[in-house]
Amino acid sequence: MTSTAWNAFWTMLPAEPGAALWDSSPQLTAAQHLPLFRDHVDPLLPLVDIGCGNGRQTQWLARHFPRVIGLDIAEAAVELATESHPAPNVTYRCADLLDEHAAAALHTELGDVNVYMRGVLHQLVPDERRTMLGTLALLLGDSGRLFAQELTERTGWYVSELLASGQPLPKTAGLAAHFDFGARVAPAHEGQLRLLFERNGFDVVADGEIALHTTENTSDGRPLELPTSYLVARAAAPH
Ligand SMILES: C[S@@+](CC[C@H](N)C(=O)[O-])C[C@H]1O[C@@H](n2cnc3c(N)ncnc32)[C@H](O)[C@@H]1O
């Protein structure tokens, strides 16, 4: 997905909290993730939130790390995050994490960092995923660790069936229209997110299944939760 498409998405999105399907409360999101990676990371390293969007999770994470940098390809998201989710130890910047030179410059500036990434890889085609895994390894260096929550094939099937059921799910349907969400190939075949990382220079230290809480309700009034995967990984030492 291009920066133009993401900019259009963030520019058109209504300003109220929860307008994006994935814009769930940090209590249901980053606060559920932190226990999954806290014991694996050096808490004194900066944390980079890649594809930070409106910064809602970034701001919460800033309570737990000395310095947090939210990066997003969309200038409109960076502006929104700066206005709506500030914190004294957070800065937001526009950067394309498919750009290896930008990643190398960041590593020179910040040193090794921890990375938080929620829902970014699934929008990339396979070649771009490999490129992004390369830039992530650059950012982590020897001592950083990565937490990622990602959509999988199962998420795609789940969303397709939901939409086919005819339930009124305007946010989910809107995303499907804008991004082909639920119809594109998800980042990894079922159970293969770990392999994707392992084949591209990472040691996976933890992984599992986890719900992605959304801001939409199903027709029975329950909050829609999507099945997704997470992992915690470090860049493998070169052999
Ligand atoms: C599904 S949203 C998730 C936002 C945020 N992580 C959250 O959980 O609220 C994906 C975000 O990734 C950003 N993004 C997509 N491709 C990117 C890239 N190549 N480099 C940096 N950010 C990117 C998009 O602009 C978008 O804000």
Image (cartoon, rainbow, N blue to C red):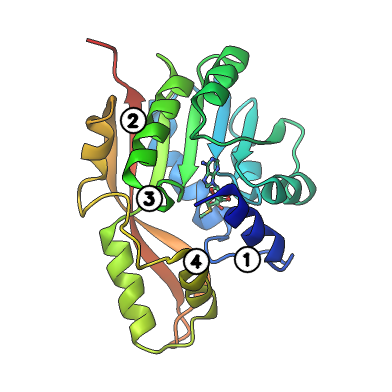
Q: Which mark is residue 214?
A: 4
Observer-side mark, 3 or 1, equals 3
Which residue type carries mark 1?
A: Gly
Is residue 213 in view from this perspective?
yes
Residue lying at 50% horizontally and 69% vertically, measured from the top left:
175
Which residue type carries mark 4?
A: Thr
Q: Dots 3 and 4: beta carbons under 8 Å?
A: no
Of the two numbered discs 4 and 2 on the same chain, state the one appearing first in sequence: 4
User: For the C terminus, which image quadrant?
Assistant: top left
Of the two numbered discs 1 and 4 on the same chain, state the one appearing first in sequence: 1
Q: Which residue is mark 2?
A: 233
Name the image quarter holding residue 14. bottom right
Is residue 44 in view from this perspective?
no
Disc 3 and disc 4: Cα gap in Å?
Answer: 14 Å
Element on which disc 1 rests: loop
Which residue type carries mark 2?
A: Ala
Of the two numbered discs 3 and 4 on the same chain, state the one appearing first in sequence: 3
Q: Is residue 2 above or below residue 231?
A: below
Which residue type carries mark 3?
A: Glu
